[in-house]
Amino acid sequence: MKKILILTALVLNTLISFAQASSVEMADTMRANGKIYVVVGIIMIVLLGFIAYLFMLDRKLTKLENEHKK
Amino acid sequence: MKKNWWKYLGVVILLYVHLGGLLLEAPRLNILNETVRALYFHVPMWFGMVLLYMVSVYYAVKFLRNPLSDADIKSVEYAHVGTAFGILGILTGMLWANYTWGSPWHGDPKQNGAAIALLVYLAYFVLRGSIENEEQKARLSAVYNIFAFAAMVPLIFIIPRLTDSMHPGNGGNPGFNAYDLDSRMRLIFYPAVIGWFLIGVWIVSLRVRYRLLQNRLIEN
């Protein structure tokens, strides 16, 4: 009985320390209802816009190069 | 399309890095909190800069061995985009430092070293701008380019390791050991370096093509 009590106490102790380890503040609630996906969306729009701009510049240069070859 | 496969590869990698870097599980660390994710976006700027400078120095040596004007243009444009990456690296680092170290400029040896390295490279563009003769400009700047690269390596990689630095992996420890970067972060960090380097090479190629076109127009 005593052994079981000590064992439970030890298990509880490790559980508590695990709980403490995971209580470091992260944006968990942000992810759930803090509209983090809006931010992700905004960053993706900026990235895609930047890349689209690069592709357009690339095409413009290719056109000019082809024109100049003639 | 076939010739441009590496551009699409860079784009796909960056999309993965941005989505994964923002949404996948990251290590829970005190003080850093969610800013640990800044590693996916801040450090690839520096890795990209160093890689672009390496290619720049390669073309500088190539130019000195065989003075073709193409090698000079490539060398300059690689250094140019590399410097842009470095400026983005220093700005992102300052924002990150402000909220984790307490102030944007903390006098950290790596931060100071990186700033000096950038100034050394800015002097490269000053040198180029101050010489009228095209051949002389190309030759002198190629020689200076080698010096600038040789100065950057100890400033960023050696001195911060000799003294105490707030950057992880510095102050006597090898970079990226098990405690600094766990395996989950590597899965996003290394692709981020490759992705940004590919995009950097793409921007360089656009600038080189523009310069070659400009030269041809001046000749005619």
Image (cartoon, coloured by chain):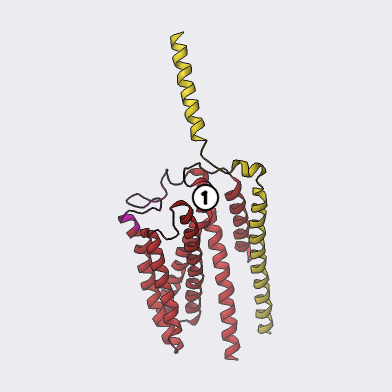
Q: Please indicate, yes or no, whether residue B1 appears anywhere in the rendered image.
A: no
The colour applied to the residues of chain B in this rendering is red
Q: Position of residue B161 (x, y in %)?
A: 33, 55
Q: Position of residue B17 (x, y in %)?
A: 58, 53
> Residue B60 lies in what quarter of the image?
bottom left
The colour applied to the residues of chain A in this rendering is yellow
Q: Which residue appears farthest toward the left when viewing the image?
A: B162
Please tell me which residue is depicted at 51% across the width and 31% down the height of the picture.
A19
Above or below residue B169? Residue B202 is: below
> Residue A59 lies in what quarter of the image?
bottom right
- Pick the residue in front: A63 or A38: A38
Q: Position of residue B29 (x, y in %)?
A: 48, 42
- Give the magenta range: B160-178
Q: Please indicate, yes or no, whether residue B84 appears anywhere in the rendered image.
A: yes
Above or below residue B123? Residue A25 is: above
Please tell me which residue is depicted at 44% across the width and 11% down the height of the picture.
A3
Q: Is residue B82 within the magenta segment?
A: no
Above or below residue B107? Residue B172 is: above
- Pick the residue in front: B95 or A67: B95
Please tell me which residue is depicted at 65% across the width and 72% down the height of the picture.
A57
Above or below residue B43? Residue B177 is: above
Residue type at mark 1: give it.
Thr
* Placement of the N terminus of chain B among the 4 image quadrants: bottom right
Q: Position of residue B69 (x, y in %)?
A: 49, 82
Please name the residue that numbered disc 1 is placed on: B35
Q: Which residue appears farthest toward the top when viewing the image?
A: A1
